[in-house]
């Protein structure tokens, strides 16, 4: 029996693949292709904007349960190790997330058309620890890197420290604790001793862990519910503290706690991208295998998407999953990555064919399949000969021949028995017996490898397969095997196997299945003792657990974890089978029992480590919690779990826990005695619902907050969540209406009529208030004393931003009110943005550049001095993108914009971050800050952010500049006329002007301006004139307060003069005169950037007026100012026009000199 049990374990541990040669070849080829691509890759010079520069590769392995997805993926491991690489592995757990939310394919041998259904987290039974599948893989990376030694450790940590600051590292390891070791330790000498036990003596380590476990158990048994709850208060939130003290603390950290969830999410994704980029560019190949992606939670999928976009070759993502519907979030994520340069390989695994099943069965039973085939062939030939001999005789002679043949065959069978051994009951040839066994296996398992292994083990346990020790082979009776009861699926079969185990082992497996795919031995022993062995004399929980699960390990159901402190299921079908032992009616109560025991019996020093395990178990049985005190305790745990998940940017999980807390709020007494806890549950649940897109639930919960809240700041907080949710749905006007309705609660009212009059009044009031104010005056503003004004000012600052897109007539008034409130009540983090917007509005209203620049300088300085990183992008866009181009050289405005974009993407201000890219593009072009090829490459590099964040307007704006550059460089694509804004990157004719008007008016007007520029440069003056007329018809209202009206005046004036030269219409001269006057005002406001444009237009106007002396003077001034400003293309234009002027004057020598200079400048600009 012992030898048979050992063989059973070997069958479970068999790693040999059968019938997977083609799939294994595809897998290896994909891996080696990614390595060769890495060695030959160079910086991308592709002109396509619809791509991502990441060169990581993805391999997808799809197949039903038990077909060997993980096994074939692991065949890559020796090759990765041979290449001095890292093979990392993570796995998503079924019961801890979807809780058996499965619609089909539990047999493991079903049709591949069966699909696993996907349920949103809010409909599932319990979430897991955030990012659990990813965290285990990164923990594996840290361990492997540590084992490599100090040199490799230092190389990676040095690279990480170069790109990730200490504060940023904290954000990463708070979300994924497994990263703490590598982000905080400079070298291996600083690694904690407990984290270096991989090099210590294994038996000594286990001895110490056992002793400590026993001590913990003795101490924990004396704990009661009340004392444990008191001890665990270190890990509870501030809800247990006095409410007045809590309100005081919340007034300080209100914004950070309650308003920055979205910012944290963006920052985590941004930093994870930096992290994965750093470790993937060290040089060693990394393969990240994540099993069971069909169970991945939404938060983990978003993070995995970030990792894919941030990784560089040699980095391979290897995902296994079961067949799912195309609408499954995992497949949707893969679909979204189609536009990138990431290589993708798909491998479909199906059930084995009969020939492969025969090889697998022969391998499991240690039968030489080749020898069996030879015997089978010989036997069939012999049978054929005998049949022929039988047919030769007639009558009595025939019966004699038949008897002779049977005697011969019997002799042959006896000979085979003496050599190979055979079944005593089966009279067939031994080789046909294997074939019959294979046929029986195929009919039951449908060729599913895992099902086959379990079925063989089941027959061994039932005695249908017996080991003949004397003859050293397995024997069986095929007829008895066919007659035995057959279970239709592997889960049922394994369930029956578990039921034959000792009762305590069954209980242990059930507990393991309830906790998850992996369970700590100390936890398992504690639960076994408290539920089933209250009088057990073994003090050490780990020893107790090991004793009870030893049989399960021998049966191949469980396996020890690498650190020997826990156990995991060999396959998720075994976990499902163990969980099925619980009656459906008792599942919730059993989970609740587990949660209660862990809540009350765990020692405080490990309580936090297993906090999510406790929360998960209570969440599965939350409907059975009825006692008031227990409800309050459970609400507290759910609130903490939600806050921890939210802090890790795992918003669906956070919403799940907050919703469970809400369910436990039963009556008015709860709102009266635990007001803060109740309002926090509802408010934070609504916030996370908004972030997950569940707006229906958000509205339901916010309505309850507004109905029951007793404090003004709670109401304003609810309004803020609703306004932000409406803005995220592009419902700008309703968002502004809701926000203004909320501001009435603090006495801020907006007029319903005579808006212009009120705007001018508040403008005058704000100018008077801000007069003679400097940065130091603003820094000395007193802290906000009225707590409700913190969310009010936060809401007002938000309205400043969204009113620019919705209800633009109210935007100036809201901005002025925001500045006034900040000056009255104190400084908030949104004040620099409000002051920057105030400066930009002064320009729009026609006030002096000096005054506008003053407030832009104040806003920038405040931003830097106070360190409000969430508003960097907004402030930089308003100052360096709008105001400073009037007062500083355009080239000086370039550098802060990309940095501000990165800050916006990191801290969640995506809209303003991407607008910084648009500002960077137009400033770079108009200042000729880069040669055209370099400019195009820069735009390609930035365009991936527009694609990643789905910003259509920013992407179109970037494409416009790429197409303009392509036309100048001669790459017009399908259009033969370079004067047309049409090509491979952007097609003005194909883009609907009406659709652009609805989405981004500034973009439409900007494209028309670029069409004017192209038309004029390439001599198609009619097209340029039509575009300028189209732009004039729209009023160019979006250009107000920007540099664009002056660019428009310059090129419209030049086009008008060119048209006058052809058509001699006085109307063109009037237009040119008007443009010249407008540009003169611009030159006065910004002489450093507009002087060369003004002088060139003045020169052309003088030529038209036949004032040749003035013309030559202004041409020279234009060339000199353009040279000083390093505006290559417009200096070249001035030289070109000056040369044409000399040609008309028949001064060919001077004309040649100027045109030659223009040629060299154009050549330099074009790279």
Image (spheres, rainbow, N blue to C red):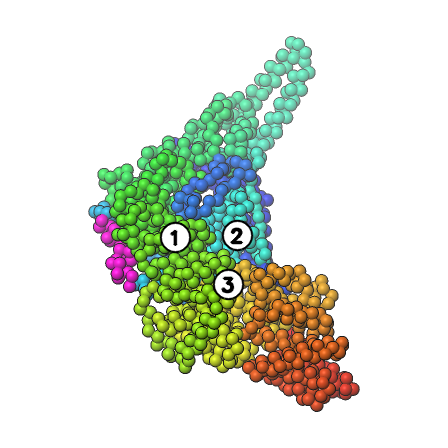
Q: Work out which residue is located at the far bottom of the displayed protein and give it.
A: 1109
Q: Residue at x 55, y 46 (%)?
A: 326
Judge from the rendering whether residue 606 lies leftward or rightward of residue 969; answer left or right. left
Marks 3 and 1 sit apart, C-alpha to C-alpha, by 24 Å
Based on the picture, tell me whether residue 237 belongs to the magenta stretch: yes
Tag of residue 1092: none
Residue 405 is drawn in which quadrant? top right
**Mark 3 or 1, nearer chain start:** 1
Residue most extreme to the front: 754
Give the residue displayed 64% in from the left and 23% down from the top.
384
**Measured Cα–Cα span from mark 2 to mark 1:** 34 Å
Question: Which of the labelled discs sits on residue 806, or is there none?
Answer: 3
Query: At numbered mark 3, what does the secondary structure look like: helix, strand or loop?
Result: loop
What is the quadrant of the N terminus in the image? top left
**Residue 145 pos. (x, y %):** 43, 59
Q: Which residue is mark 1?
A: 703
Please tell me which of labels 2 and 1 falls first in the chain.
2
Which region is colored magenta?
A: 226-248
Q: Residue furthest right?
A: 1146
Disc on the earlier residue, 2 or 3:
2
Q: In this rendering, does residue 875 appear at all?
A: no
Rounded to the nearest whole Å, what is the CA distance between mark 2 and mark 3? Answer: 31 Å
Question: In front: mark 2 or mark 1?
Answer: 1
Residue 82 relative to residue 534: left or right:
right
User: Mark 2 = which residue?
Assistant: 333
Q: Is residue 1008 visible?
A: yes
* Element marked by disc 1: helix
Element class at badge 2? helix
Q: Residue at x 33, y 33 (%)?
A: 502
Based on the displayed image, in which of its 4 quarters is residue 374 positioned? top right
Is 488 above or below relative to 774?
above
């Amino acid at each position: 029996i012992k030898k048979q049990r050992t063989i059973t374990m070997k069958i479970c541990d068999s790693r040999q693949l059968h019938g997977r040669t083609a799939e294994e070849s595809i897998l290896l080829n994909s891996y080696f292709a990614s390595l060769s691509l890495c060695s030959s890759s160079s910086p991308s010079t592709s002109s396509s904007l619809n791509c991502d520069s990441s060169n990581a590769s993805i391999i997808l392995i799809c197949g039903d349960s038990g077909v060997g997805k993980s096994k074939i993926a692991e065949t890559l491991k020796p090759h990765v190790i041979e290449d001095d690489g890292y093979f990392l592995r993570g796995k998503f757990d079924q019961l801890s997330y979807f809780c058996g939310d499965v619609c089909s394919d539990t047999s493991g041998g079903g049709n591949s058309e069966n699909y696993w259904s996907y349920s949103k987290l809010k409909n599932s039974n319990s979430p897991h620890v955030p990012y659990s599948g990813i965290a285990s893989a990164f923990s594996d990376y840290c361990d492997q890197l540590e084992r490599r030694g100090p040199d490799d450790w230092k190389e990676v940590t040095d690279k990480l420290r170069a790109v990730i600051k200490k504060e940023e590292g904290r954000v990463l390891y708070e979300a994924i604790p497994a990263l703490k070791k590598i982000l905080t330790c400079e070298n291996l000498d600083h690694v904690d001793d407990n984290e270096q036990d991989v090099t210590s003596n294994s038996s000594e380590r286990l001895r110490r862990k056992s002793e400590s476990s026993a001590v913990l158990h003795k101490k924990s048994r004396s704990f009661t519910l009340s004392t444990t709850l008191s001890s665990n208060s270190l890990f509870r939130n501030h809800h247990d503290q006095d409410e007045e003290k809590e309100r005081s603390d919340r007034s300080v950290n209100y914004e950070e706690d309650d308003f920055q969830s979205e910012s944290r999410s963006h920052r985590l994704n941004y930093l994870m991208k930096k992290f994965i980029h750093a470790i993937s560019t060290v040089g060693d190949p990394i393969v990240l295998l994540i099993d069971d992606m069909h169970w991945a939670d939404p938060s983990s999928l978003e993070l995995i998407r970030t990792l894919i976009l941030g990784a560089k070759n040699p980095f391979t993502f290897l995902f296994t999953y079961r067949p799912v519907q195309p609408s499954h979030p995992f497949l949707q994520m893969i679909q979204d990555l189609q536009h990138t340069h990431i290589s993708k390989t798909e491998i479909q695994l199906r059930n084995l064919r009969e020939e492969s099943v025969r090889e697998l069965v022969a391998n499991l039973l240690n039968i030489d399949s080749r020898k069996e085939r030879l015997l089978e062939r010989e036997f069939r030939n012999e049978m054929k000969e005998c049949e022929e001999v039988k047919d030769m005789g007639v009558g009595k002679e025939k019966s004699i021949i038949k008897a002779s043949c049977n005697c011969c065959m019997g002799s042959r069978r006896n000979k085979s028995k003496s050599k190979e051994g055979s079944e005593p009951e089966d009279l067939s040839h031994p080789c046909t017996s294997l074939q019959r066994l294979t046929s029986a296996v195929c009919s039951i398992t449908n060729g599913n490898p895992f099902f086959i292994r379990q079925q063989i083990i089941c027959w061994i346990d039932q005695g249908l397969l017996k080991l003949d020790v004397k003859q050293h082979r397995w024997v069986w009776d095929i007829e008895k095997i066919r007659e035995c009861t057959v279970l239709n699926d592997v889960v049922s079969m394994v369930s029956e196997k578990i039921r034959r185990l000792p009762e305590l082992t069954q209980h242990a497996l059930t507990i393991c299945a309830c906790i998850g795919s992996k369970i700590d031995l100390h936890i398992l022993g504690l639960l076994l003792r408290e539920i089933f062995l209250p009088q057990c004399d073994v003090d050490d929980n780990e020893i107790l657990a090991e004793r009870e699960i030893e049989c399960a390990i021998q049966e191949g159901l469980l396996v020890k974890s690498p650190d020997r402190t826990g156990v995991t299921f060999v396959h998720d079908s075994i976990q499902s089978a163990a969980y099925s032992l619980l009656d459906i009616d008792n599942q919730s109560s059993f989970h609740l029992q587990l949660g209660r025991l862990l809540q009350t019996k765990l020692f405080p020093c490990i309580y936090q480590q297993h906090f999510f395990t406790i929360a998960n178990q209570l969440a599965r049985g939350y409907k059975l919690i009825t006692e008031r005190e227990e409800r309050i305790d459970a609400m507290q745990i759910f609130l903490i779990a939600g806050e921890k998940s939210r802090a890790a940017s795992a918003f669906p999980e956070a919403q799940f826990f907050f919703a469970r807390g809400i369910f436990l709020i039963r009556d008015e007494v709860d709102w009266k005695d635990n007001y803060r806890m109740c309002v926090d549950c509802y408010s934070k649940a609504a916030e996370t619902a908004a972030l997950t897109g569940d707006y229906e639930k958000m509205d339901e919960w916010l309505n309850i907050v507004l109905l029951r809240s007793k404090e003004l700041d709670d109401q304003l907080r609810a309004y803020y969540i609703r306004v932000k949710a409406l803005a995220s749905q592009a419902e700008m006007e309703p968002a502004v209406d809701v926000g203004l309705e909320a501001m009435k609660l603090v006495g801020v009212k907006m007029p319903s009529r005579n808006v212009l009059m009120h705007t001018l009044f508040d403008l005058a009031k704000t100018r008077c208030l801000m007069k003679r104010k400097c940065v130091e005056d603003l820094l000395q503003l007193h802290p906000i004393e009225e707590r409700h004004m913190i969310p009010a000012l936060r809401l007002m600052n938000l309205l400043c931003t969204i009113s620019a897109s919705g209800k633009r007539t109210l935007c100036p008034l809201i901005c002025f009110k925001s500045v006034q409130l900040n000056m009255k009540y104190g400084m908030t983090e949104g004040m620099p943005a409000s002051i920057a917007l105030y400066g930009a509005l002064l320009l729009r209203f026609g006030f002096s550049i000096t005054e506008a620049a003053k407030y832009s300088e104040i806003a920038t300085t405040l931003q830097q001095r106070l360190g409000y990183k969430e508003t960097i992008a907004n402030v930089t866009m308003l100052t360096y993108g709008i105001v400073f181009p009037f007062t500083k050289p355009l080239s000086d405005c370039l550098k802060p914009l990309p940095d501000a974009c990165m800050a916006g993407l990191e801290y969640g201000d995506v809209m303003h971050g991407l607008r910084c890219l648009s500002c960077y593009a137009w400033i770079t072009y108009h200042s000729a800050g880069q040669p055209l090829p370099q400019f195009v490459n820069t735009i390609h590099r930035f365009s991936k952010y527009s694609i990643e964040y789905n910003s259509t307007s920013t992407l179109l704006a970037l494409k416009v500049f790429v197409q303009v550059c392509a036309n100048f460089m001669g790459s017009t694509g399908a259009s033969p006329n370079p004067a047309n804004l049409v090509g491979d990157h952007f097609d003005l004719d194909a883009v609907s002007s009406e659709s652009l008007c609805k989405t981004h008016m500034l973009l439409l007007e900007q494209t028309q301006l670029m069409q004017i520029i192209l038309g004029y440069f390439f001599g198609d003056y009619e097209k340029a004139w039509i575009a300028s007329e189209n732009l004039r018809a729209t009023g160019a209202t979006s250009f107000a307060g920007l540099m664009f009206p002056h660019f428009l005046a310059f090129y419209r004036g030049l086009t008008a003069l060119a048209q006058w030269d052809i058509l001699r219409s006085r109307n063109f001269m009037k237009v040119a005169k008007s443009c010249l006057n407008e540009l003169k005002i611009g030159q006065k406001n910004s002489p450093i950037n507009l002087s060369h444009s003004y002088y060139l237009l003045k020169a052309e106007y003088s030529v038209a007026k036949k004032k040749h002396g003035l013309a030559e003077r202004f041409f020279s001034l234009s060339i000199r100012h353009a040279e000083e400003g390093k505006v290559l293309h417009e200096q070249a234009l001035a030289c070109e026009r000056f040369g044409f002027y000399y040609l008309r004057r028949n001064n060919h020598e001077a004309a040649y000199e100027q045109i030659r200079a223009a040629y060299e400048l154009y050549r330099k600009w074009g790279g």
